[in-house]
């Protein structure tokens, strides 16, 4: 039995799929957070 470890290619593909789903899910969240952080930084600087 040599199929104890999944092939690196399939593993990579699965990982990419998961990452894509995660990025799609948290894409808007990240954008909102980034905008908020920028606004806060500008306000703190007085700018």
Image (tube, rainbow, N blue to C red):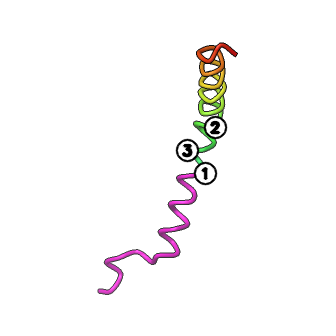
How packed mark 1 is, by other alpha carbons closer than 10 Å (few <14, some 14-19, many 20 or more), is: few
Q: Is residue 20 above or below residue 1?
A: above
Q: Main secondary structure of the magenta part?
A: helix
Q: Residue at x 50, y 60 (%)?
A: 15
Q: Which residues are magenta?
A: 1-19
Q: Is residue 31 left or right of residue 12?
A: right
Nearer to us in this view, 22 or 42? 42
Magenta-span inclusion, residue 22: no
Q: Which residue is mark 3?
A: 22
- Residue 35: where, in percent of width, then height? 66, 25
Q: Is residue 43 above or below residue 11?
A: above
Mark nearest the camera among 1 and 2 is 2
**Extreme residue in the front direction:** 46
Q: Which residue is mark 1?
A: 20
SS state under label 1 = helix
Instruction: Answer whether labels 1 and 3 touch (C-beta < 8 Å).
Output: yes
Q: Which residue is mark 2?
A: 27
SS state under label 3 = helix
Magenta-span inclusion, residue 13: yes
């Amino acid at each position: 039995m040599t199929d104890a470890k999944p092939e690196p290619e399939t593993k990579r593909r699965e990982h990419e799929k998961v990452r894509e789903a995660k990025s799609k899910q948290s894409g808007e969240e990240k954008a909102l957070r980034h905008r908020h952080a920028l606004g806060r930084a500008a306000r703190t600087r007085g700018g």
